[in-house]
Image (cartoon, rainbow, N blue to C red):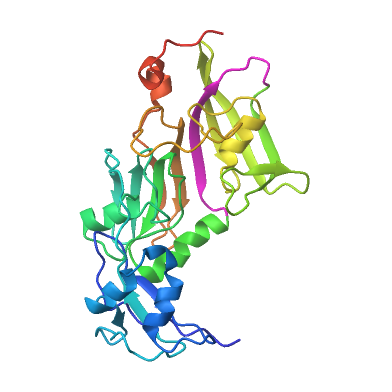
Amino acid sequence: MRRRTPPPPAPLPQRDGVDPVRVRLPAGGAWATVREHLVERLTGAGPGTVESMFAAGQVIGADGRAVPPDAPYRPGMYVWFHREPPAEVPVPFPVEVVYRDEHIVVADKPHFLATTPRGSHVAQTALARLRHELGLPTLTAAHRLDRLTAGLVLFTVRPEERGAYQNLFRDRRVRKEYEAVAPYDPALALPRTVRSRIVKERGVPSAREIPGEPNAETRVELAGYRAGLGRYRLVPATGQTHQLRVHLAALGVPILGDPLYPEVTGPVPAGDFRRPLQLLARRLEFTDPVTGTRHAFSSGRRLSAWTSYADWSGESLPHG
C-alpha cells in the first residue's frame, strides 16, 4: 500500500488555542478559482464572508503567503484560514491540571466544558484552554469526555507520541472508573455487569440499545445510598458513546441531570449551569507506553447532588 503523504505544516499559528482550518482542494469539480470553491464549500459562513477573507489576506497557502482572490484552482492544493469563532458563553469553571510531564497532561475537566473543539464549542473547550494557559500549542486529546461529564482527561504533548497513548484506549489498557448519582432502587441487585449493543446514529442526540452481539460492557456497583439517592461506581470495559448513561437508564436508575436518558428533554440552554449531569470520571490508571511509568490519577471533584442535593436541585432531599 502507498503511504499517504502527510499534509504540510500549518503556516498560521493557533488563535486562542484553536488550530486554523485546513482545506485540501479535491479533484474534480468545475471551479475556476480557489475562491469559487471556498464560497461553495463554506455556505454556512454567511454572504460575503469568504470574499472578505480573501480581501483581508486571511486565506494562506503552504508557502505562508496570502492566496489572491483570482488564484487558479489546483486539485490537491492546501489552504488555511481562521474562521470567525462562534459566539460562546464562557464556562465559568476552571480546568484543573492533575499531572504534567514532558509527554502528557492529565486534566480534571468541569461539567459543561467540551473536551475538544466541535460544532458551536471552539474556544470554550478543555483543549483550547489548556493550549493557551500552558503554552503548549501541540497539545492534543488522547480520548474525550462528553461535554456534560466532568473528570479526568488525558492529553498528549508531542504529536509523534499521540498514537501510542490513543492505542491504550483502543486496546483497553486503561482502567477507567466513574461515579454517578442516580435514584436508589432497593430491588436492583448490585453489583452486576451490564452488557448490551449500543448504537449512536449521526444527527440523533441520544444513543440506543438494539438486539445483537454486545459491544458495550459496564460493571455497576453501589457505593452508598441515602434518602432515595444512590452513589454508583461504574467501571466500563468498553467506550461506546453515552454508554454509562444508557446502561444506568436501562437499569431504571437514570443519572440525575441527564437531558437525554431515559427520554430527551431538550438541550441544556447555553449559560444554564444549574443541575449538572451527576457523572464524574473519577479515576484513570494505565502504564505509560513511552516511559513505562505506572500512573493512577484521581479527580478532586465531588458530585454536588450527593454532597448537597438541595444546592444542586434547589429542592429538599427526596425520600424513599
Rendering quarter of residue 43: bottom left
Is residue 209 found left or right of 161 in the rendered image? right
Residue 72 vs residue 17, the one in the foreground: 72
Q: Position of residue 183 (x, y in %)?
A: 56, 20
Residue 257 in the image: above or below residue 7 = above
Q: Furthest residue to the top?
A: 319
Residue 111 in the image: above or below residue 26 = above
Residue 246 vs residue 24, the one in the foreground: 24
State the quadrant of the C terminus: top right
Residue 185 forms part of the magenta stretch: yes
Q: Position of residue 268 (x, y in %)?
A: 44, 36
- Residue 7, visible in the rendered structure: no
What stretch of residues is rendered in magenta?
172-188
Residue 308 in the image: above or below residue 270 = above
Rendering quarter of residue 74: bottom left
Rendering quarter of residue 299: top left
Q: Position of residue 284 (x, y in %)?
A: 44, 44
Residue at 36% x, 43% y: name it: 109
Is residue 49 found left or right of 295 in the rendered image? left
Residue 220 vs residue 36, the one in the foreground: 36
